[in-house]
Image: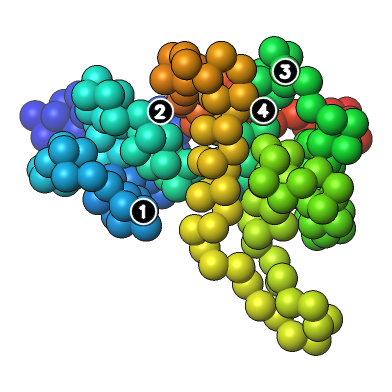
């Protein structure tokens, strides 16, 4: 009876099988996530006890290591979520300083891929890069979609996957460019805000839109 009482008193997982669920972005080892980009020594010291991404992110933010927080968050996310975060940042920056018509068209293709991530949509983003300008926010996000997964080979019968960390790197760059697009002198303030947007994406508070045909 005592054993049964002890078993029944144990906390119950919120969802069946939750204890076997893969770790979320905030649960990943920060050291492993940060291994794909250069981290300055003062920020490295904040990782010495091998914290999860969520803990490391709070430390980076409190110590003012915003570039490292931005990069780590992008690399911890799924590629699609990272593109969504960068897209949301770009759309907010656009309200203060509009994009060109070509860049708006490119971002429309990014959104179309986000809503329905097909290979045709991915290739449509590749085709928009030149018109957007390869160094513009829109061009970078179109390239991020192109390199998000799937063959990048020019030969149909030869499958070549993109390098695994390039998409996140481009998304992190897009978030930075959004933070300096208007009032560059306040970029740190803007970047903190955009990192907050990224955290909202991770928490599921800013979900990618559902296709119209999937709502019924």
Contact between marks 1 and 2 (CB within 8 A): the answer is no
Q: Is residue 161 above or below residue 189?
A: below
Q: Which residue is tagged 2? A: 14
Q: Position of residue 18 (x, y in %)?
A: 40, 40
Q: Position of residue 36 (x, y in %)?
A: 37, 57
Mark sitting on residue 97: 3
Which comes before the other along the chain, label 4 or label 2? 2
Quick check: 172 left or right of 112?
Answer: left
- Cα gap from disc 2 to disc 3, whole angstroms: 44 Å
> What residue is at 11 percent from the left and 45 percent from the top?
48
Q: Is residue 152 above or below residue 139?
A: below
Please, which colouring scheme is shown?
Answer: rainbow
Binning the other alpha carbons within 10 Å of mark 2 as few (below 14), some (14 to 19) or many (20 upward) gives few
Secondary structure of residue under mark 4: helix
Quick check: 183 left or right of 1?
Answer: right
Which comes before the other along the chain, label 2 or label 3? 2
> In this rendering, which labeled residue sits more in front, label 4 or label 2?
4
Q: Which residue is tagged 1? A: 37
Contact between marks 1 and 3 (CB within 8 A): the answer is no
Which comes before the other along the chain, label 1 or label 3? 1
């Amino acid at each position: 009876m005592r054993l049964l009482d002890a078993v029944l008193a144990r906390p119950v997982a919120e969802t069946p099988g939750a204890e076997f669920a893969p770790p979320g972005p905030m649960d990943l080892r920060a050291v492993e996530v940060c291994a794909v980009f250069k981290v300055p020594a003062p920020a490295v010291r904040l990782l010495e006890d091998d914290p999860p991404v969520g803990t490391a992110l709070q430390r980076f933010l409190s110590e003012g290591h915003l570039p490292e927080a931005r990069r780590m968050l992008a690399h911890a996310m799924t590629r699609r979520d990272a593109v969504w975060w960068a897209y949301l940042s770009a759309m907010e920056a656009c309200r203060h300083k509009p994009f060109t018509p070509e860049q708006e068209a490119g971002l429309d293709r990014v959104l179309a891929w986000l809503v329905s991530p097909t290979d045709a949509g991915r290739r449509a983003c590749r085709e928009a890069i030149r018109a957007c300008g390869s160094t513009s926010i829109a061009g970078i996000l179109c390239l991020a979609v192109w390199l998000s997964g799937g063959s990048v080979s020019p030969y149909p019968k030869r499958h070549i996957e993109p390098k695994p960390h390039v998409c996140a790197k481009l998304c992190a760059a897009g978030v930075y460019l959004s933070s300096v697009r208007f009032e560059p002198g306040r970029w740190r303030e803007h970047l903190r805000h955009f990192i907050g947007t990224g955290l909202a994406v991770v928490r599921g508070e800013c979900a990618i839109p559902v296709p119209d045909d999937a709502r019924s």
